[in-house]
Structures are given as C-alpha cells and as structure tokens.
Image (cartoon, rainbow, N blue to C red):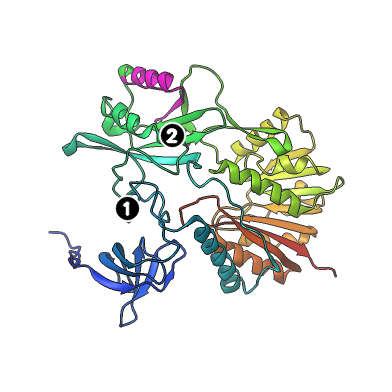
Amino acid sequence: MSRRQKRKALPSQSFRITIKSLSHDGRGVAHYPDGKTIFVDAALPNEEVDVTLINQRAKFDEGRCVQVINANPDRVTPLCKFFDICGGCNMQHLSSTAQIEHKQSILIDQLLHFGATSAEEILPPMKGEQWGYRRKARLGVKYVRNKETVMVGFREKQSSFLADINDCSILDPRVARLILPLRELISGLICKESIPQIEVACGDDSVALVFRHLQSLSKIDKQVLIDFAEQRNIELYLQPGGPTTVTKLFPDDQNERLSYKLEDFSLEMLFHPMDFTQVNAGINRKMLNVAVQLLDLKPEDRVLDLFCGLGNFSLPIARSAAHVTAVEGDEAMVQRGRENARHNGLDNLDFYAANLAGDFYNQGWAKQGFDKLLIDPPRSGAYEIVQHLSTFAAKRIVYVSCNPATLARDASVLVKNGYRLKSAGVMDMFPHTGHVESIALFIKEKS
C-alpha cells in the first residue's frame, strides 16, 4: 500500500462567485468569504460566473468557469473550437485589444513592484497577426492504446494529458493543417508507441518537422515518413537521442537550413530547425525596427549584443553601426551567427562564445569599448550581468525581455548604476497566451 495519502475528492457541484481581477497568466482571480484565493480559467474581471473546482491547495484553489452569468464587455467568442480543453493558449475569450492592455499593465506593475521604478515613456504596444502566427512549437504525441488512436498537439488545460485536437488557430496554417494527417500517419507506424514529440520549425518558404523517437525505426516506417514528407512538401528530421542526434531524413540533401527574410534590412537569416528563433515573424520584424530606433545608431558606433543567438539583432544593427561584437553562450549558435554574417556579406561583426553567467569582463572582446549595448536574455534575466554593465559605459542599453518580473529586477540594478529608464513597452509576440514580451531603453545619466 502506498504511503502517499489519497487526495481528497473535489466537490462536483458548481458554485457562483464574482471575479475581481485578472492574474498575470490570464486567469480570473476571486476570493472566498474567508479570504482564500481562487484562480478561475476562462473568467474575466467583474464577471459573475459558475465555477467547478479542478484543484485545491493550502493557499489557493483552481477552478474552471462553466457558465458566465454577467459577461465582461471585453469578452469575445473564442475562434478555436478546442479552446475549452487545449492548453496551447488561454486568453481567446478576451478581446485582442484588452489582452495587450492587460500585458502592458503587467509590465508597468512589475517595474514598480519588483524594480521600484517606472518608465518615463510607455511605448505603443507592438501588434500583429492574431491567428496562425506561431512558427515554432513542440507538439506532444501519444498513442492511446485503449482508444486505438494517436493524439498530436498541446496539453490539456491544467493537465499532463494531450488534448484531443485536429486543428489549431495559433499555429502557422502550414502546420495546423498537418495535425490530423500526422495523427493518421503515426497511427499506421510500427513505432507509434515510441514517438513522444514532434518539434516544429517554419521558415518563410519551408516547414520542418523533427520526430523524436525512443526506439530505432524500421525501414518500413522510414519509408512511410519519407512518403508523407514528399507528399506534403515538408522537410523531415529524426531525433533518436539528445539535440545533437538530429539528422535529416527527407529530402536527401545536405541543406539543413530554413530561412526568414528581414526585408527592412535586406537580410536573409539561416537557421537549423532546432535553433532558437522568434515564434512570431511579423512581431520579430517590428521588434528589430524598434530596437534599432531606440539604439539611435550612428555610423561610428561600436555595439555589444549579449545573448546574440544566430544574430537576429546583430546583423540588423551591423547595417547601421561601425562594428558589432556579438556574444552567446552556445557555440553552435555562434557558428550560426558567423554563417549568417558571411551569407549576407557583412564583415563588421565578430561573434564570440562565452559563459555570460560568469566573469567575462577580462576577456579581450569585452575591452574593446562600446557606445551602445543590446541584451536579450532568457526568462531568468541577466541579474549577474547587469550589475557590471555600467563598466562598459555605453550611452544606451536596449533590453529585450520575455519575463517582465526579471526585467523589472534588472532595471532596478541599472537605475542604481547610473542609468535611467527612458522608455518601455510590450510586444504581442504570443497573442491569446499569458506570455508578456517587452522592450526597454536605458540611457546613461550625465555625470
């Protein structure tokens, strides 16, 4: 007998409650008479809703809205028919305008709450296509034996189970229309029980799927996959182990690059399907334009780009600056950055690999002197780095963030070290989700 205690059964009966606000992840927030908080999926502020419980914790409960009694004026009908079950996005019930306003309020609140600061100017929100925007995704795969069917897609809301979907409103349409054919394809494979996920990557002109498989594939299965890829005009890769085991199956050529164009900078960026790229091509283009404008580049400027990746910011900056020093922790991405510089005929960039969480300030590239600086860290932010950025004495720092809480924390450090937060704003990189992407400009105070 397991020592783990059985969970207390949740009440099955719904109850009525009034939603007070919206959480950072897009759920309605309400309170019981005793003050305990409950987060309610698909509920909006000032709504009276009927709720069923899906989870109970010591400090808060979680529930699902089953009926709206009084609707918020910003409530809309979700476009996706799977919205109620699929966890791929959670804010389709809120108008697009209200979504971005909510994200902007989160940024402002986080800057004040975690950074004890505020921007002198709030930039207009960057908005783009609301549907079919997502070019990168990881789709779960599961063969359900008792139903003799294969699930392909995202997890259910508040669950580890895959949602039973056959379409997706936010995925690039070239991928969304493959969900049902992929289910049918995998159902017919001998190895259908050993495929846990498919990585999706889309370029401007091509789509790549990377099949993770836990067992070796038979010749029969490989041929079935090749036939599928050829019929659908997609590139197909296999991944039997870690990321370094990814190999191309179809087409049988040496080209393992997708690409996207940045027309405003006359650039074509090459990338491997497993490389990090921005999921939203339209917002990425707008973001690059804004970043370059905020840097206020001069022909003589030397610019440092930290967490440069494959050069998404570095190359556009190099079009206007004298020189760009681009630094990244992943050696493979550094090689990709160099490849992109060569591909676009740029020779005023240098790419370096360095542990940006460590003490890199004594390395040769860090002593070159920089006029401007761009930083695009992961969700954890750049707390160790921003404490030393003032030593570079850059006149301007543009900080691109995928987590307003860590941006706010880092902003407080920059402000204490002689910078002022000139402007900040949000980007609708992930419409209909709770993800908040933002950009901020810091200017060196005159001594």
**Residue 241 magenta-drawn?**
yes
The amino acid type found where label 2 is placed reads: Val
Q: Earlier in the sequence, mark 1 or mark 2?
A: 1
Give the side of residue 434 with respect to residue 423, left or right: left
Picture residue at 25% right of the left edge, 65% below the top: 53
Q: Which residue is mark 2?
A: 175
Picture residue at 49% right of the left edge, 35% below the top: 201
Q: Could one spot residue 354 in this view of the protein?
A: no
**Residue 179 magenta-drawn?**
no
Q: Which labelled disc corresponds to residue 84?
A: 1
Give the side of residue 367 with respect to residue 282, left or right: right
Direction right: furthest residue: 300
Where does residue 410 sit, x and y in percent of width and height? 63, 64
- Tell me if mark 1 has few (under 14), some (14-19) or many (20+) residues whose alpha carbon lies within 10 angstroms of its own: some
Q: Could one spot residue 301 in this view of the protein?
A: yes
Position of the N terminus, as image quadrant, is bottom left
Say if 372 sits above or below 234 in the image.
Answer: below
Front residue of 29/331: it is 29
SS for tag 2?
helix
Q: From which residue to which does the magenta span run?
A: 221-243
- Depth-wise, is mark 1 or mark 2 nearer the camera? 1
Q: Which labelled disc corresponds to residue 59?
A: none
The number of numbered badges drawn on the structure is 2
Where does residue 298 sit, x and y in percent of width and height? 84, 48
Where does residue 72 sit, x and y in percent of width and height? 41, 66
Where does residue 404 sit, x and y in percent of width and height? 56, 62
Position of the C terminus, as image quadrant, is bottom right
Give the side of residue 381 with respect to residue 346, left or right: left
Query: Marks 1 and 2, Cα distance to the nearest angstrom?
Result: 21 Å
SS for tag 1?
loop
- Tell me if mark 2 has few (under 14), some (14-19) or many (20+) residues whose alpha carbon lies within 10 angstroms of its own: many
Front residue of 355/247: it is 247
